[in-house]
Image (cartoon, grey):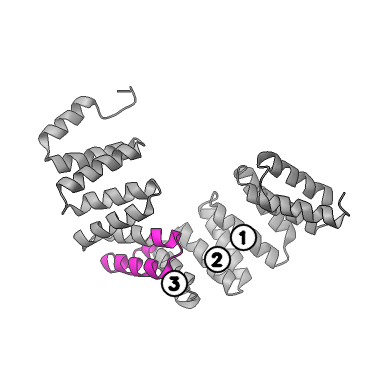
């Protein structure tokens, strides 16, 4: 046992002796997950649901761990079982909605978020998820209504403000999109997806200098995300700053020699210059 472990081996043994086997396995699985040992957590939680197959909490916990391990099929199976066994608990349905969103399965996401919302009405996070699913099905008006309701309940919910910005952008309301995304970044300055969308909105509004500033901040905060550096090179080329753009591409290719987008852009610039 390491000195920074809060739960001693003696405590674990006492828990195992005092609790039914399935419950002990569930609790020890949660501890393993908290300590970052997700494989061990999964093993213990699978043991738990094997011993207590009607324990919806254990199934839900197993679903969370499988999702963290990126085994989304197993996560969906476990969360669906947890949701069926806990008909009043919104958490497994909410998690199912998030997984479906990540898979761009918007009908499944909408169904899951609606189930979660029935169990916990007027929850801002669930409303935001449902709006994202609806927006994914191109129902932008209803999505915006849900998002505005979400921020009326929680004015500091950055994901909802980001979604508002995205919906306004898709509807062509660029000023409103910019304002919502700026509000997002006030609430969560490190939210890279919102800042990247703000770059796109600035460009759509013809605000090149503002777009360049936002993109430079993104690159500084996320130096390993090479797509931002390629975007910055594209802005250089668009402004006629050929040497600066090529320099940025060289930096990208030094980090990732097989970066297809950077290679295509470099080749296009060389072709423009007559193959030099």
Q: Mark 1 points at which residue?
A: 198
Q: Which comes sooner in the sequence, label 1 or label 2?
A: 2
User: In this image, 213 relative to 67: left or right?
Assistant: right
Dots 1, 3 in contact, CB < 8 A:
no
Q: Which comes sooner in the sequence, label 1 or label 3?
A: 3
Dots 2, 3 in contact, CB < 8 A:
no
Query: Viewer-nearest of labels 1 and 3?
Result: 3
Asked where in the image residue 175 lies, by quadrant, the reply is: bottom right
Residue 136 at x, y = what percent? 48, 69
Residue 93 at x, y = what percent? 31, 61
Span colored in magenta? 98-127
Q: Name the residue under label 2.
A: 165
Asked where in the image residue 156 lies, by quadrant, the reply is: bottom left
Quadrant where the image shows the N terminus: top left
Could you tell me if residue 155 is visible in this image? Answer: no
Give the distance between the C-alpha atoms of the residues marked 1 and 2, in whole angstroms: 8 Å
Query: Viewer-nearest of labels 2 and 3?
Result: 3
Secondary element under disc 3, as helix, strand or loop, is helix
Residue appearing at x 63%, y 70% in the figure: 174
User: In this image, 70 relative to 191: left or right?
Assistant: left
């Amino acid at each position: 046992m390491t000195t920074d472990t809060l739960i001693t081996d003696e405590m674990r043994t006492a828990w195992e002796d005092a609790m039914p086997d399935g419950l002990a396995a569930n609790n020890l699985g949660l501890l393993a997950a908290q300590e970052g040992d997700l494989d061990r957590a999964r093993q213990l939680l699978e043991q738990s649901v094997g011993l207590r197959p009607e324990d919806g909490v254990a199934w839900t916990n197993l679903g969370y761990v499988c999702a963290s391990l990126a085994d989304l099929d197993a996560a969906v199976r476990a969360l669906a079982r947890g949701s069926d066994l806990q008909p009043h608990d919104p958490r497994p349905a909410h998690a199912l909605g998030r997984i479906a969103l990540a898979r761009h399965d918007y009908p499944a996401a909408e169904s899951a978020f609606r189930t979660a919302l029935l169990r916990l009405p007027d929850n801002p996070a669930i409303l935001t998820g449902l709006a994202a699913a609806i927006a994914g099905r191109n129902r932008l008006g209803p999505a915006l209504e849900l998002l505005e309701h979400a921020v009326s309940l929680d004015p500091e919910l950055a994901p909802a403000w980001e979604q508002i910005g995205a919906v306004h952008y898709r509807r062509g309301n660029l000023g409103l999109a910019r304002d919502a995304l700026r509000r997002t970044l006030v609430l969560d300055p490190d939210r890279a997806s919102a800042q990247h969308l703000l770059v796109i909105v600035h460009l759509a509004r013809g605000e090149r200098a503002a777009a360049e500033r936002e993109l430079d901040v993104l690159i500084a905060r996320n130096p390993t995300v090479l797509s931002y550096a390629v975007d910055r090179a594209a802005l250089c080329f668009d402004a006629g700053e050929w040497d600066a753009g090529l320099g940025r591409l060289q930096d990208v290719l030094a980090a990732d020699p097989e970066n297809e987008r950077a290679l295509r852009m470099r080749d296009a610039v060389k072709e423009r210059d007559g193959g030099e």
